[in-house]
Structures are given as C-alpha cells and as structure tokens.
Amino acid sequence: MTTYGYIGLGMMGSAMAENLIGTGAQVTVFDIDEIAVATAVALGATAAATPAEVATASDVVSICVPAAHHIEAVLSGPGGIGEAAHDGLHILIHSTVHPDTMVAAHQTAASWGVPLFDACVAGGADNARAGTQMVLAGGLADMPEPVTTLLDIFAETIVDAGPIGSGAALKIAFNLMTYAQFAAAATSYDLMASVNADPKALLGAWKDAGQLGVLTEQFSGLLGIPSEHIAGDFRTMLETQVGISQKDLSLAMELGQSRPGTDAVIKAIHDAMPAVYGIENN
C-alpha cells in the first residue's frame, strides 16, 4: 500500500490532508503548528517531528507551505527531506511560488534521485476537503502512477500546464484573474451602493450572464459588511487573505509582462486588495 506524507497544514494543506486521511490511507504529517498537527492526528494521521521523518515513512510527500524559503527549508534545511531521500520517494509541491522555485526544487530533488513535480491547487479549502478542487500540474506527462493516483484523490480536475514550473506559472496567472474579478466585484458593488441602487441586482445580473464565477460568488458574501463588524478574528482572517493575495500578485509582477502597461494593472490590483477586502479604513 502506498504511504503518504503531508508537510504544511495551513488552510489548504489541512483540508487536503483531511481528505487524504479520510480515504483510509496511511498519512504522516508535519507542521510547526502543533494544533494543526493534533487535529490531523485526531483524524487518523501520524505526527512526525521533522520533514525527514515524513519522508522516511512515505512513498509520496506533499508540500504545501507559504513561500520559497519554506520549500528550501523543508527540502534541504536541518531535518529536511534530503536527509531521508530514498528509492521510491516522490515529492509534490502544492504551494503558490515562482516557477523558478519549482525548477530549483526539482533539480535539488533530482540530485537525490527523487522525482519532484509542481501540483498547484485551486478551488478553495471546501473543495480541497471534498477532493473536488483543481490541480495545475507541471510535468504531468512524466508523473508515475503513485503520483497520479494521489492527484485523483486530491482533485476533480487535473490540468496539464506543461513542463516543470508551468503549473506554478498557471497558478499565478489563475490567481491574477481571480483577484481581478474580486476587485471588479467590490468596485462595482460600491458603485451601485453609491447611487442607492441594489448591489445584489448587479451580482444577480452578472451571474445570469455567466460572468460570475464560483470563487467570486463566494467572495461576494464579504461585500457590504458594515465596517464596525470587521473586527477581532474576522478582521484577522481578512488581513490574512489580503496578505496571501498580495504575495500572489507580487509573484505575477515578478513574472514579467507581455504587453506595455500590464505591470501597472497588476500593481493597481495588488494595491487595492485592502480596500477590496474592506479593511483599508479599519
């Protein structure tokens, strides 16, 4: 039986791990958040003290950490996967990072004789928990059966983006389109409200025209919330979402632009994110 490891139990990682554990698979987990680890263990996972311990116990290891330096630490830092690389080990990276980060990670793992692929994810935590999210894959044509089997557990849709690094590029472009739609929804909602028109009519018309995506429809629930209600844990959650969005949009700016002026468009969306999420004046 194939054994699995999961490193990085944030919002998406914990949801994906929960889905995997629910299949009855043997899953070993690691995160610096002891509460997240304890939650996974309560569901049936085994806790590891280091990424190396995860690798030792696993045939396929998933990594879902916030940024490039976290990936480097998980792979090559003290107690990293490199200390326990073995025949039959495969690595998937689900993080949203620059394509160059994926290529560098692939080369590092290759030096150990271990295949590594980008398998970026989209669709939100609820879909991740249900196994109905989308995987944006780099190197799909070269993925062996243990890896593709895991992707089928994680996702309803698997998109072949191209060679290693392409999944990461696609995820950044996908997120740019998503945040642009969030910004359009928030701006248009405010425009309707400013003339005492019903903003919900706009969202309804947008949906009827086939222009309102599922993620933007979910986001629209945040629109129109009175500023006095944006406080405490709710505000903290929104601040976290703004931080994630601006990190992803910064990556989009780093990738370069094919048309004059597109860098200004991406920067405008980046800078608007606090207002889009309603925390700029709180």
Image (spheres, grey):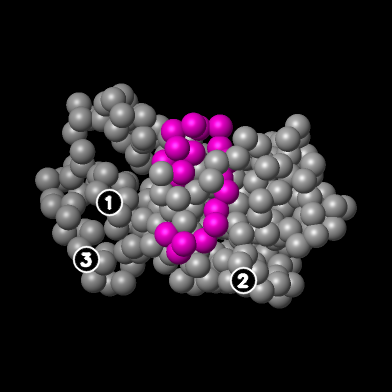
Q: Which residue is mark 3?
A: 205
Marks 3 and 1, Cα distance to the nearest angstrom?
A: 13 Å
Kindly report which numbered mark, 2 or 3, lies closer to the viewer in this rendering: 2
Query: Residue 154 appears at what percent x and percent y?
Result: 50, 64
1 vs 2, front mark: 2
Say whether residue 125 is left or right of residue 172.
left
Residue 186 falls left or right of residue 93: left
Q: Nearer the viewer, residue 188 or 280?
A: 280
Crowding around mark 1 (Cα neighbors within 10 Å: few <14, some 14 to 19, many 20+) is some
Residue 148: which numbered mark, if any? Answer: 2
How many discs mark residues in the rendered view?
A: 3
Inter-mark Cα distance, 2 to 3: 40 Å
Q: Which residues are magenta?
A: 22-41
The answer to whether residue 39 is left or right of residue 166 is: left
- Label 2 sits on a secondary structure element that is helix
Amino acid under disc 1: Ser
- Cα separation, mark 1 vs mark 2, equals 34 Å
Q: Quadrant of the C terminus?
A: top left
**Is disc 2 surrounded by few (<14), some (14 to 19) or many (20+) residues within 10 Å?**
some
Q: Which residue does the image show at 12% across and 45% down from the upper left?
A: 196
Q: What residue appears at the point 72 percent right and 52 percent down from the top-left corner?
A: 102
Is the N terminus in the top left, top right, bottom left or bottom right quadrant? Answer: bottom right
For the question of whether residue 134 can be seen, the reply is no
